[in-house]
Image (cartoon, coloured by chain):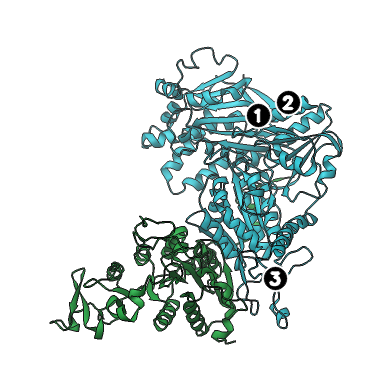
């Protein structure tokens, strides 16, 4: 008899070969659950090689998601369900599955060839190594072939649609409708009727397989989440970043220019922006990272909202140009979608190890503003805020996203255009300068200079990378002037703290025993951990920094309200160094440098250890 | 509001070495720019690093003295967003062909409508005398006491190889020709690369004397003009005819007439490449060094295509609606 288990939340991991369509399957499953009304978070994890060796552990592409009937902040630690399309997928992911968890395996991915490629001697399906799990063996490849035997499609095309069988089966297992995926397939394959037809057929076959077979009788039900009222959509981090830039351009009335050189994991920002030319967006795929950022400097000199995006290695070679932008005092937004480093490092893995680079990675005293999003949807607000600060304060702003945020997705109660904060460039009025000379480095109370751009009559002026005389901007080698200008540029950055929100507490009391101070993508793991710790009676709070330079004005006071400050980072302790340096407190670091995000449990364990 | 060359002089002292070829170029540029009929506020000079790159500080227009090798990329971004501006790039042989070589070729192939003035003095002047990418093999300098090993770059061949839509060569010591070429470059709709032989009288004095000195100039230089036969030398006695794709020297006093000669056609890419290959150090009986407009081709500019693409996209998709963009294609409501 069929039984249905009610569950609060489910973590599911899809693991298969790079060519098995795991990312698509995972995204479809996520979208369907989001539409149903669950909260969720996703985490794709795939190899850097486009065509990694088939069937090997190195070639495994994973997609993890957690969906639930209450708020979800991370893609989950341990998995309730693993879908393993081949032996390599099982081998690389088994350790993530909970005891008694469900493992759905594609039997044909465990033939001799696949076992050999995965370097597995005895098939785990044939010994007792999976005794602690509920294993559902399905010959997905064979069933897909059966379904499509009269389709006339070649073997390759048939093989390619087997992920739809799994997806259909999961929809049955989790009581979800197929309609979103049907719509999606129609959009994707509308022009290829045979492919569309076969995918739909296989999807339904998977669903009906669950329905008719009597082998597996447990279905699961995860109710709708009690999310705040509103209209939602699903959003990925890079997409949110792109939309934030467009929104800032539209609200400020400035033309958006995005100069970029393709690099993982930032390229999707370029792809997204390139689609929206009807917003007047000008994307420029430059010949290299230097040209990408210097083209932005030219665009900013001409009055555009100039933005560039890259990842750590690209930011490194943009360094000299960023120094020029600091020197010229022009608005510029630089998105760094951080990845594992140093050098080429781990291109498809996440890390937060470019914080010091963002703050100090240029020659000379060359401060920039640094802001960071905390989740995929938050990348929208962070990107918008980066633009606002850049334009209002005539400074380069570094937006520190990362691979985890960039490729993760979550539901987003998107804002209305009218709700976005207005901001305007600090433009001079040529009429004010009929009787006086325009001084390009004259400043207002925030030490911000006026943005005169070509085309403004009477305001012709020269700027450059050589130290400039105060006010006039002419070349100056005067010692006192240099010190004055260095100090002024730094003071201008400090003054931005008057124009950003004070640091708040995300969860927990305003003072107490332990404060977890985070920044960037560990937000979800910290949030989940603190929720559990509070329920268990621990005196712990969470503050999450959006602004890494300058820090919010009250940060020092806030840190002093706690006995201990724990700083978890996906790096070797970079924020910890900054906090210790600035506030002289013995903060405690929690470092993870595995190319992977924190699990909730890792945060909990560390809090218990230092408590 | 009209302005004269004098209105383009800034309050900054010009700091080039006395006798530097840059003075002559600055004077001619100011003269040409004053005659353009453009508004002064619509003119921008962008430079990189090097002696010549101080140039923008001496022009009372908008200007940027940027970083080494990047003026071309900076100008690309400016021109992409402000196509209506008149943009001039000031660069040298090290700035544009060594550290900035990549940006130069990409600007040329994209064909932004800018003027690039390449001050070629075949030496690094600002860093006090090292060989440059245009220095000849064997050149003895501070960094090559036993002679430079590098094979010299040929700027005209680089330009044509990158599908530059305009290439011309001129020299600091022929102000009339210089002025004429600057005008031609500015009139050209597209990227105009103008190589200017410029004498560095401190670190590489006389590098171009063969071409600029009265005694040798006529026999070692060929001033090409559109539709005109290629003659040079004393009394224009010498000519060049084409034997297939091979330029051959002929003497008009020895049985050859003007009708036999190669007629310059600046719209002919193949023939322009032949001119670019006339690059030997002139000696008795060798080819002269060509000056003038080698090549000019009015293919479309990048910024025009960019604007057109935006218009087409706007027509096809409708003017961007931010609220619709934020909502995307698939929303659901939680009540």
Please tell me which residue lies in front, B14 or A354. B14
Subunit ID for the residue under disc 1: A
A450, above or below A86, in the image: below
- The span from disc 2 to disc 1 (Cα, nearest Å) is 13 Å
Q: Quadrant of the C terminus of chain A?
A: top right
Mark 2 vs mark 1, foreground winner is 2
Are the residues under badges 3 and 1 in a single subunit?
yes
Q: Secondary structure at mark 3?
A: loop
Image hue for chain A:
cyan
Who comes first in sequence, dot 3 or dot 1?
1
Q: Which residue is mark 2?
A: A605
Q: Secondary structure at mark 1?
A: loop
Asked if residue A574 can be seen in this view, the reply is yes
User: What residue is at 44 percent from the left and 34 percent from the top?
Assistant: A52
User: What residue is at 55 percent from the left and 60 percent from the top?
Assistant: A294
Mark 3 vs mark 1, foreground winner is 3
Image hue for chain B:
green
Who comes first in sequence, dot 2 or dot 3?
3
Question: In x, y percent, where is residue A357?
Answer: 63, 46
- The span from disc 3 to disc 1 (Cα, nearest Å) is 50 Å
Pointer 3 with pointer 1, Cβ within 8 A: no
Q: Which residue is mark 1?
A: A77
Question: Of all residues shown, which one is farthest toward the front?
Answer: B145
Asked if residue A70 can be seen in this view, the reply is no
Q: Which residue is mark 3?
A: A427
Please tell me which residue lies in front, B297 or A8. B297
Question: In x, y percent, where is residue A115?
Answer: 44, 21
């Amino acid at each position: 008899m069929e039984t249905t288990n009610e569950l609060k939340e489910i973590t599911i991991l899809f693991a298969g070969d790079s060519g098995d369509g795991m990312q698509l399957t995972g995204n479809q499953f996520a979208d369907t659950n989001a539409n149903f009304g669950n909260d969720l978070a996703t985490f794709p994890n795939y190899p850097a090689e486009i065509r990694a060796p088939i069937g090997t552990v190195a070639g495994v592409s994973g997609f993890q998601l957690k969906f639930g009937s209450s708020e979800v902040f991370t893609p989950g630690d341990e998995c309730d369900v693993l879908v393993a399309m081949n032996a390599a997928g099982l081998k690389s992911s088994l350790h993530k599955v909970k005891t008694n968890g469900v493992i759905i395996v594609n039997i044909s991915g465990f033939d001799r060839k696949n076992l050999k490629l995965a370097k597995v001697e005895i098939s785990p399906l044939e010994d007792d190594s999976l005794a602690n799990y509920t294993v559902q063996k399905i010959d997905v490849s064979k069933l897909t072939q059966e379904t499509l035997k009269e389709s006339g499609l070649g073997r390759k095309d048939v093989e390619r649609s087997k992920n739809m069988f799994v997806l259909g089966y999961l929809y049955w297992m989790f009581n979800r409708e197929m309609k979103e995926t049907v719509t999606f397939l129609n959009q994707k394959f509308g022009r290829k009727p045979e492919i569309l037809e076969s995918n739909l057929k296989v999807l339904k076959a998977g669903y009906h397989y669950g329905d008719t077979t009597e082998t597996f009788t447990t279905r699961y039900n995860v109710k709708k989440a009690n999310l705040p009222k509103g209209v939602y959509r699903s959003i990925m981090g890079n997409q949110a970043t792109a939309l934030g830039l467009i929104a800032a351009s539209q609200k400020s009335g400035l033309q958006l220019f995005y100069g970029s050189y393709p690099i993982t994991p930032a390229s999707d920002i370029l792809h997204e922006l390139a689609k929206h030319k009807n917003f007047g967006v000008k994307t420029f795929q430059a010949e290299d990272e230097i040209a990408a950022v210097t083209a932005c400097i030219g665009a900013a000199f001409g009055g555009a909202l100039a933005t560039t995006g890259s990842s750590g290695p690209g930011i490194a070679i943009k360094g000299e140009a960023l120094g020029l932008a600091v020197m010229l005092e022009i608005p510029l937004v630089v998105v760094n979608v951080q990845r594992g480093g140093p050098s080429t490092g781990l291109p498809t893995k996440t890390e937060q190890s470019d914080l010091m680079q963002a703050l100090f990675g240029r020659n000379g005293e060359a401060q920039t503003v640094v802001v960071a999003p905390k989740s995929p949807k938050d990348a929208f607000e962070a990107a918008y805020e980066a633009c606002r600060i850049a334009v209002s304060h005539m400074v380069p702003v570094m937006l520190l996203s990362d691979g985890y945020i960039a490729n993760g997705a979550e539901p987003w109660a998107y804002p209305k255009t009218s709700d976005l904060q207005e901001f305007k460039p600090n433009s001079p009025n040529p009429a004010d300068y009929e009787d006086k000379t325009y001084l390009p480095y004259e400043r207002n109370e925030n030490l911000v200079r006026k943005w005169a751009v070509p085309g403004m009559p009477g305001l012709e002026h020269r700027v450059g990378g050589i130290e400039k005389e105060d006010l006039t901007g002419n070349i100056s080698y005067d010692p006192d002037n240099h010190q004055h200008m260095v100090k002024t540029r730094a003071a201008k950055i400090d003054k931005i703290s008057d124009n950003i929100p004070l640091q708040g507490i995300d969860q927990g009391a305003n003072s107490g025993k332990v404060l977890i101070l985070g920044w960037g993508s560990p937000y979800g793991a910290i949030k989940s951990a603190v929720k559990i710790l509070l329920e268990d009676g621990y005196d712990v709070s969470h503050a999450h920094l959006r602004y890494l330079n300058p820090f919010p004005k009250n940060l020092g006071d806030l840190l002093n309200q706690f006995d201990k400050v724990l700083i978890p980072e996906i790096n070797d302790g970079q924020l910890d160094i900054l906090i210790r340096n600035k506030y002289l407190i013995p903060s405690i670091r929690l470092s993870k440098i595995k190319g992977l995000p924190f699990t909730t449990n890792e945060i909990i364990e560390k809090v218990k250890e230092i408590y | 509001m009209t302005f004269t060359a004098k209105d383009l002089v800034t309050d900054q002292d010009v700091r080039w070495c006395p006798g530097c070829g840059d003075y002559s170029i600055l004077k001619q540029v100011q003269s040409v720019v004053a005659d353009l009929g453009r508004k002064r506020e619509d003119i921008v000079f962008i430079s990189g690093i090097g002696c010549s790159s101080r140039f923008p500080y001496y022009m009372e227009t908008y200007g940027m003295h940027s970083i080494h090798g990047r003026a071309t990329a900076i100008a690309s971004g400016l021109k992409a967003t402000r196509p209506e501006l008149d943009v001039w790039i000031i660069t040298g042989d090290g700035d544009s062909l060594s550290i900035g070589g990549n940006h130069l070729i990409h600007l040329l192939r994209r064909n932004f409508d800018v003027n690039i003035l390449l001050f070629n003095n075949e030496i690094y002047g600002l860093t006090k005398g090292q060989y440059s990418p245009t220095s000849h093999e064997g050149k003895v300098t501070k960094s090559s006491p036993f002679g430079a090993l590098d094979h010299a770059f040929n700027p005209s061949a680089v330009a044509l190889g990158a599908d530059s839509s305009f290439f011309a060569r001129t020299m600091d010591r022929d102000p009339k020709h210089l002025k004429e070429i600057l005008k031609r470059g500015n009139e050209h709709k597209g990227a105009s690369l103008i190589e200017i032989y410029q004498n560095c009288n401190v670190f590489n004095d006389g590098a171009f004397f063969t071409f600029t000195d009265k005694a040798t100039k006529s026999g070692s230089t060929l001033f090409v003009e559109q539709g005109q036969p290629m003659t040079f030398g004393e009394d224009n006695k010498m000519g060049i005819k084409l034997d297939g794709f091979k330029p051959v020297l002929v003497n008009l006093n020895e049985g050859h007439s003007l009708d036999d000669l190669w007629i310059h056609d600046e719209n002919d890419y193949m023939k322009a490449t032949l001119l670019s290959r006339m690059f030997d150090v002139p000696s008795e009986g060798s080819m002269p060094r060509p000056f003038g407009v080698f090549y000019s081709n009015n293919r479309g500019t990048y910024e025009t295509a960019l604007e057109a693409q935006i218009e087409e996209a706007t027509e096809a998709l409708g003017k961007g609606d931010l609220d619709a963009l934020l909502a995307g294609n698939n929303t659901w409501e939680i009540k």
